[in-house]
Image: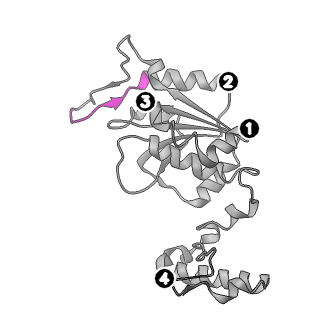
Amino acid sequence: MITIDIISAVPDLLDSPLNHSIVKRAKDKALVEINIINLRNYALNKYGQIDDAPYGGGAGMVLMVEPLYNCITELQKNKKYNQIIFLTPDGETYNQKTANYLSIQENLLLICGHYKGIDDRIRENFVTMEISIGDYVLSGGELAAAILVDSIVRLVPGVLNDAESALNDSFQDNLLAPPEYTRPSEFKGWKVPDILLSGHDSKIKEWRFEQSLQRTKNRRPDLLED
């Protein structure tokens, strides 16, 4: 089982994506444990303060060092984290290889930034991985954390009914997935490729590989460089 703890200033943003579909089924099967920690439980005062203006001036607010420090150190009393991950636009771009790696860890801690981010002393002294989901900026790290959780959980053995399904996903082996079809075999004159109706498993597998390779060449040739 994998445990994923998430520190958030706005925990309600994570309610829906982490309580439906595959992630919910994984939780129900006790294959994954997900804990959302409200950073405001570690606020400095009765007003719930967890952020302040940045030193040196400038617009926006920064999550303060003390609430994050108190939260992380309390969590570390009960478990040892394989990785403490900060979701940030200037982190390493997330990919399937990283998802595969994270899915075999035992304990992960995700830190969601908000406003202008977090006090850099937390990054310097606690964070072991910094991950970006793309070259754009969100209001906070919660949606990015939900993406990480979904991509990790579906790789945990036993989560998907068909264990082979995750192995055939796009980006496994640096290839995009081949085209897929289902019933009916013909619709408005649009036909499913004959090979998929042939029942010849080895030829179907060969066709799918060729389609994956061609699609990758056309759409993401950079993947083939590796």
Q: Is residue 171 above or below residue 54?
A: below
Q: Which residue is under mark 1?
A: 30
* Amino acid beneath label 4: Asn
Under circle 4, the secondary element is helix
Residue 98 image offset from top left, x and y in percent:
59, 55
In terms of sequence position, does the residue under pointer 3 or pointer 2 come before the other? 3
Q: Which residue is under mark 2?
A: 78
Given residues 222 and 192, the one toward you in this image is 192
Q: CA distance from mark 2 to mark 1?
A: 19 Å
Query: Mark 3 or mark 2, which is nearer to you?
Result: 3
The dot on residue 9 is: 3
Q: Which residues are magenta?
A: 57-66
Q: Please give left or right for residue 137 compared with residue 105 in the image.
A: left
Residue 65 is one of the magenta-drawn residues = yes
In terms of sequence position, does the residue under pointer 4 or pointer 2 come before the other? 2
Q: Are marks 4 and 3 in contact (CB under 8 Å)?
A: no
In terms of sequence position, does the residue under pointer 1 or pointer 3 come before the other? 3
Residue 148 is one of the magenta-drawn residues = no
The number of callouts visible is 4
Which quadrant: the C terminus?
Answer: bottom right
Residue at 38% x, 26% y is: 64
The dot on residue 218 is: 4
Q: CA distance from mark 4 to mark 3?
A: 42 Å
Q: Residues within 10 Å of mark 3 (few under 14, many from 20)?
A: many
Q: Is residue 210 above or below residue 11?
A: below
In terms of sequence position, does the residue under pointer 1 or pointer 4 come before the other? 1
Q: Are marks 3 and 2 in contact (CB under 8 Å)?
A: no
Q: CA distance from mark 3 to mark 2?
A: 21 Å
Residue 100 image offset from top left, x and y in percent:
65, 56
Q: Residues within 10 Å of mark 1 (few under 14, many from 20)?
A: few
Tell me if I can see residue 1 in this picture.
no
Q: Please give left or right for residue 153 compared with residue 60 in the image.
A: right
